[in-house]
Image (cartoon, grey):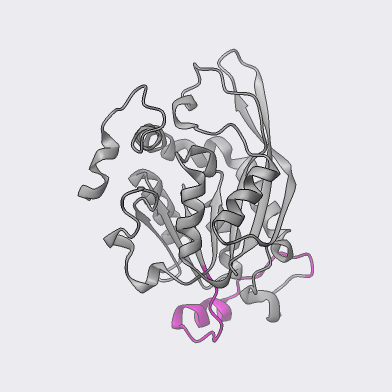
Amino acid sequence: MSAYAHHHHHHHGHKGTGASASSHNHEYFNKLAAEYDERHGKTLDRLIEEIRARLDFIGVAWVDDDDDNNNGDGSAVDDATTRAKKSEGTLEKTVRLLDYACGTGVVSRALAPYTTQCVGIDLSENMVAAYNTRAENQGLTPSEMHAYHGNLCVPEDPNPPAFASPEFTNFDVAAVGLGFHHFDDPALAARRLAERLKTGGVLMILDFLPHEKLDASHPATQTITHHGFTEEHIRRIYEEAGVGKDFALQELAAVFHLSKENGEEVKRKIFIARGTKA
């Protein structure tokens, strides 16, 4: 993809330029993809539980809302008949998720039982490959869950040809799970995602509340452009992107542990935010 070629160049010291964080992200996450799920397994499972516990908060008309597929405790049974109906496309209702900066697909895995289609996009080919391998291993077809390599946030490329077809628009929910703090321009990302929502669709962001800067020696430092977000900052981003209707933000009980070089653990508090495209 020639459009992304510029992400492979190094622009050390140009923190604000379009390619900088992206090129560092690309290398860092390609390396990380292989071990990401193993390293963060418990936290990711906990995040999935926390997302599923907030289906009403997110406020999408999920597929299972009016089916009898729930086990009382909120865990969905993605049973054979529903799966068969989904793959035959005979479920009347469709609920489509765009999982941006999808990584290995944590948000997609959390929401798959309540949606009819999950579409992932990520800058790292290795993350995309890990996402698609996982989906195949779970017996999901590409029409149910599939990720693509790409970038929706190149400032001078508002409508990348690779994502111009109808299957990449009109989503019921667009989500960024722990990717927002890696973006050069989070407000641009929110606008680009809002454009791909249907009217009444929901933008959902999971990310870190404000925290101290990482030690410069941590390998992720060059990929992190924002050190957490306040509720006011996120609200402003939502409003400017046209998804500020019914804006709400909650802190999750789960925390993300990052180990510093000196062996200390840094605890990160995580929020989930939602807003509707008016």
Viewer can see residue 95: yes
Q: Nearer the viewer, residue 278 or 58?
A: 278
Viewer can see residue 102: no
Q: Residue placed at 47% from the left, 54% from the top?
A: 100
The C terminus is located in which quarter? bottom right
Could you tell me residue 235's position as x and y percent? 66, 50
Does the magenta portion include 92? Answer: yes
Could you tell me residue 142's position as x and y percent? 39, 67
Question: Main SS of the magenta segment?
Answer: loop
Q: How many marks?
A: 0
Q: Nearer the viewer, residue 265 or 134?
A: 265
Q: Going by the picture, which residue comes out furthest to the right?
A: 72
Q: Nearer the viewer, residue 271 or 45?
A: 271
Could you tell me residue 166's position as x and y percent? 37, 73
Classify residue 260 as left or right of residue 23: right
Q: Which residues are magenta?
A: 72-96
Does the magenta portion include 61? Answer: no
Vertical placement of 187 versus 90: above or below?
above
Could you tell me residue 255's position as x and y percent? 69, 37
